[in-house]
Image: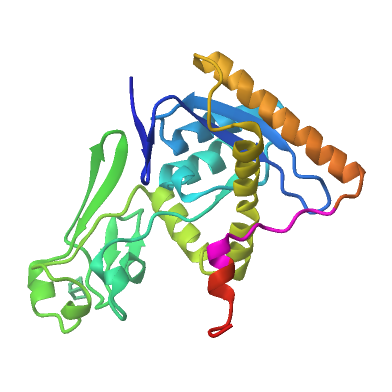
Amino acid sequence: MHYAKKRATTWIGYKVHLTETCDDAQPPLIVHVATTPAPIVDRAVLDPLHAALATKDLLPARHLVDAAYIDADGLVAAARDHDVVLTGPVSKDNQWQARTEGAFTIEAFHLDWDRKIATCPAGHDSRSWHPNYNLGRTVIRIRFAAQHCRACSLKPRCTRSQCRLLTPRSREEHDALVAARARETSSAFAADRRRRAGIEGTLSRGVRTMGLRRSRYLGLARTHLQHLLTATAINLGRLAAWIGDTPAGRTRRSAFARLMAQPAGA
Ligand code: SF4
C-alpha cells in the first residue's frame, strides 16, 4: 500500500486526471480521463495522455497544464513527439542570483553549445564544460577560471564562491526552459492561466455533485470506469446547457473571500 500526499492531504487509492477542451466557440467537454495509482507523479501521465489523444485525433496545438505536469523533459517530449506546446508555470530558478536585482542568472551568459564554451558578462570564456548523466538526465557543469573571477569587479553580482559554476540541462531542455520562463512574463500567459483554471471548476463539480473523491469500487479498472461515467455525466450536462443556451455560472466565491472584498467599515 502506498500513501499519496498533496500539500496537507494524504490518501491511499487513486488519482484522476481530466483533460477538457476550452475553445471559446464550443462547449467545454472532457475528452480524456486517466486514472493512476495515487503516488504516480502528475507529469508521468502526460506522455501516455498525449499518445491517447493522438489515437483519437484530439491532440491540441497547445496544452494548458498546472505546474505539477510540467518540467523541462516534458516540454521537450511534448514538442518533439506530439507537436504540442505545453503551457504552464515551469520550475523557478532557485539560485540566489535569480532573487537578487542586478545579479547574473544563467541567461546573462552566452552559451556556445557547438564549441562547448560559455562566455560570462565580463567577457571571459569558461574553463571547463562537462556533461553529467544522472538518473537518465543530463546536466552540464560549466566552470569559469578562479583567477578571472577573483579579480573580477562584477563578482558580487555573479558568484559567492571562488568561481562561477553554471549547471544548465541539455541544450534542448535548457532552450525550452528559457523560452517557457520568458513566456511566463507575457499577458497571454496570464490569460492562459485563467483559462486553465476552468478545469478546477470541473473537478469541483465532480467532487461536490458526483462523489469523485471517493472510489465506489475496489481496483484500478473499476475506479477508472467510475471516473469515465462521472466525466460522461458532466459532458452530458454541459451539452444540455449548451443546446439550451444556459449561461455559464459565475465562479463561486467563498464567504471569506466575499468578506475580505468588502470595504473597511462596511
Ligand atoms: S565573476 Fe567570473 S564568471 Fe562572473 S562575470 Fe566575473 S569573471 Fe565572469
User: In x, y percent, where is residue 264?
Assistant: 53, 84
x and y, in percent, of residue 89 in the image: 48, 56
- Magenta stretch: dominant SS? loop
Q: Is residue 98 left or right of residue 28?
A: left
Question: Does residue 185 lie above or below 205 as drawn?
Answer: below
Residue placed at 55% from the left, 66% from the top? 257
Ligand 1 falls in quadrant: bottom left
Q: Quadrant of the N terminus?
A: top left
Residue 131 place in picture, x, y as percent: 24, 45
Which residue is depicted at the point 59% across and 48% down?
200
User: 200 left or right of 114?
Assistant: right
Answer above or below: position of 223 versus 158.
Answer: above
Taking the magenta stretch, the answer to whether it contains residue 120 is no
Residue 116 appears in the rendering: yes
Q: Choose top left, top right, bottom left or bottom right for residue 3.
A: top left
Q: Please report the bounds of the magenta region as a residue range.
A: 247-257
Depth check: 196 or 99 in front?
A: 196
The picture places residue 156, in percent across and down from the top left corner, at 17, 79
